[in-house]
Image (cartoon, rainbow, N blue to C red):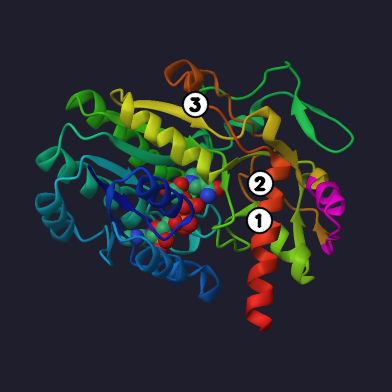
Amino acid sequence: MKALVTGSGGLIGSECVGLLAREGWEIVGVDNDMRRQFFGEQGTTMPVVEELTRTLPNYRHLKLDIRDRQGTRDLFQAERPDFIIHAAAQPSHDKAASIPYDDFDVNALGTMNLLVAARDFCQDSPFCFTSTNKVYGDRPNYLELVELEKRYDYADGRTGIDETMSIDTCLHSVFGASKVAADVMCQEFGRYFQMPIGVFRGGCLTGPQHAGVELHGYLSYIIDCAITGRNYTLYGYKGKQVRDQIHSYDVAQLFLAFFRKPCFGEAFNLGGGRSNSISILETLDMLAEFGFHLNYEYKDQNRLGDHICYISGLTKIHSFFPDWRLTYDLPRITSEMIDRRLCQKRTTRA
Ligand SMILES: NC(=O)c1ccc[n+]([C@@H]2O[C@H](COP(=O)([O-])OP(=O)(O)OC[C@H]3O[C@@H](n4cnc5c(N)ncnc54)[C@H](O)[C@@H]3O)[C@@H](O)[C@H]2O)c1
């Protein structure tokens, strides 16, 4: 079996490549290191691509740009993959406003290129799209909240946000809007062309491979600041904003579950759920338990459209994929990321 993974050097793409390789798949990875262009040297994913190419004999890398329509069509025609995981993106909510053309071209048009090529050359192959909870824009902020000592929470006692939340009439950010375009188009290809496409609206997806930068990769970046002593800037909401964290391994396992039992154009909220939810103030406490003290400054101005409390409701995922489970809790995610960062630091010093 052959899989095509876009964004194969990134957090989600590389985890999927690793999992599929262990399962015996042949994998074609597509990544042009555009993350470096978005975020500078610290954001490059080329070392990950080099490692995949060096260590996995069943991995082939292509530096294709998914904006290249003909190149994408040629690739699908030549490879006709049995499974597509589309994880290439401009992934930052904050960055998009300064690069709106690039953001839209990669997130919306790039996705369209992949969808049409998949329809024309491998229509029955399951296709997973990594969407985002930013498709709900700032609508989660309209929910009534309670302020607790270190976090906000939902006043109505709900466990998390489910897929019935409207994506209309709210502030999305340029990134959220380009992802909405891709998200809805993926749903449409699923329904209109009866293609096995799953749309996964991620909360905070994370893991040791995350090349975290200030504008994308919250947990990875805050851990990096704590380890290196770099100053962290905390923007608004008194540091009580809540996110749910899911390890990339659990995301990759879910995509494989989708391959085994696909459906047509369904959207799912995907995250660590309530048990893996944490506020920034709580993150500081957790890092202290690991022996790290974070230097930070507080700016009483939240990021535009930033969620105050976002916890993914996982009921739909569990009902479609009953055998899938989260295997990483927060301490396990964090300790793995700390170990990896410390190891990188030692290697750099040596
Ligand atoms: N990480 C998160 O917290 C999170 C949360 C919600 C949704 N998502 C979504 O999940 C997906 C994967 O996120 P990630 O964290 O792995 O991102 P990432 O930035 O780590 O990886 C994306 C990869 O895509 C590559 N890429 C970008 N533009 C490209 C292009 N034009 N052609 C080919 N390759 C290109 C980049 O070089 C990078 O290696 C994205 O769609 C993102 O929007 C991520």
Contact check, label 3 and label 1, Cβ < 8 Å: no
Mark 1 neighbour class, 10 Å CA radius: few under 14, some 14 to 19, many 20 or more: many
Quarter of the picture containing the C terminus is bottom right
Span colored in magenta: 283-296
Quarter of the picture containing the N terminus is top left
Estimate the spatial distance between the alpha carbons at disc 3 and disc 2, rounded to whole Å: 18 Å
* Residue with the mark numbered 3: 324
Q: Secondary structure at mark 1?
A: helix
Q: Secondary structure at mark 3?
A: loop
Relative placement, left or right, of 106 versus 36 is left
288 magenta-colored: yes
> Does residue 198 lie above or below 69 as drawn?
above
Rendered image quadrant of residue 124: top left
Give the percent coordinates (x, y) of residue 8. 37, 56
Where residue 337 is drawn, which disc sits there?
1
Give the percent coordinates (x, y) of residue 63. 28, 67
Mark 2 neighbour class, 10 Å CA radius: few under 14, some 14 to 19, many 20 or more: many
Rendered image quadrant of residue 241: top right
Ligand 1 image-quadrant field: bottom left
Q: Nearer the viewer, residue 42 or 55?
A: 55
Relative placement, left or right, of 8 versus 79 is right
Give the percent coordinates (x, y) of residue 281. 82, 46
Inspect the image, locate mark 1, and give the three-letter code of the amino acid beneath it: Met
120 magenta-colored: no
- At x 45%, y 36%, the residue is 253
> Does residue 197 lie above or below 238 as drawn?
above
Inspect the image, locate mark 3, and give the three-letter code of the amino acid beneath it: Trp
Where residue 333 is drawn, which disc sits there?
2
